[in-house]
Image (spheres, helix red, strand yellow):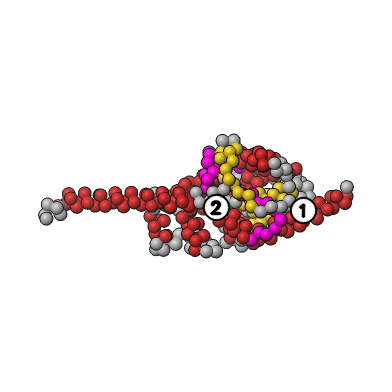
Amino acid sequence: MKKILSRKNLWIALFVFLLITFIAGYLYEATLSRNAILADEGNPITINEVKYNYTVESEGEYTIVVDSSAGSSMLNREALLRSFDGNARLFFYDRPGYGMTEGESKTPKLLAEDLHFMFRKFGWKGKFILIGEEYGSLVMQEFMNRYPEEIAGAIMINPLGTSLGTEAVEKYADRKITPLFSRRVLGTFGIPRLLNNTELVDFFDEVRLESAEEKSFYTNLWLSKEHIDTVEEELLMMTTLDPIEVQPGLLGESPLYLITSNKNLMNFSQEVYLDYSSNAQTFIVSDSVADTILERPQDIASAINGMIQKIDRLEILRKQRN
């Protein structure tokens, strides 16, 4: 018994126990992480060496192109679809690094060009209503600057394009990146996920979703290393890109809505986006809202319906003038 319980054997037993624990944690992490990342399977299309995953919902005269903030997921799409019942086709896609999309990361400019080529392959000819939030606003602004003749309207949510490379964006990105480090390191062996899923800790207690299943999906996704890596890569890219210029009058009288908070309006001088159109409006949400499409989908749906009605009226007036 003394030989069995010797110090050497105890150290060996401890080492084996820790090794088994770490391996089990790693497998637990890898399994749940992959399940969360690959949950949103849509349709594949390869454009310029990237295999994009996309979905098209509903039907209508206009095509609404939705591009969300860094870290968005199928939850954003589902939240918007629950709130929107208008007459339009909604297009969602995963940027490289998210969901089922496979390929190297691209700048917002290259993503906009890929989307344009993708829509050409679909046979879609204009009448696009662009919705871009945060990082997604960069892609939509690049699309708008390059193909203005195809744009029927645009909804810019917390746009950051004109502030790229500034100290304000660097602070914004740093604030979002800081909590990701510990989750990534400890997450290698599933420690944060285990603590959260056993309800010992709620890492996302401030997030309000419609059901426990959605909250579980959100948590598991945001504790996944691959997802965290992509979010951090996009946020860091925002600190290195050159500003995207607003081209005054580019949209003519096609409507543009700016949806933001008072804090972001001040920090990023977002009123300049109103110069795109002679028919522009600003809508303010609470400073506490971090992801408007996910947290306030009813506001976005209402904005879309109002914009479609406005575009229809403008079309009638154009025909009468001609």
- Residue 94 drawn at (x, y percent): 57, 47
Q: Distance between the residues labelled 1 and 2?
A: 29 Å
Residue highlighted by disc 1: 311
| Residue type at the position of mark 1 | Ile
Residue 73 is labelled as 2
Asked whether residue 275 appears in the rendered view, the answer is: no
Q: Is residue 16 rendered magenta in the image?
A: no
Of pointers 1 and 2, the one earlier in the residue sequence: 2
Q: Residue at x 76, y 57 (%)?
A: 309
Q: Which residue is drawn at 69% across and 49% down?
A: 63
- Residue 162 drawn at (x, y percent): 65, 46
Element at badge 2? loop
Specify the quadrant of the image occupied by residue 87. bottom right
What's the magenta region? Answer: 83-109
Specify the quadrant of the image occupied by residue 1. bottom left
Asked whether residue 19 appears in the rendered view, the answer is: yes
- Residue 18 drawn at (x, y percent): 28, 51
- Residue 225 drawn at (x, y percent): 45, 48
- Principal secondary structure, stretch drawn in magenta: loop
Q: Which residue is drawn at 71% across and 52% down?
A: 60
* Residue placed most toward the observer, 210 or 141: 210
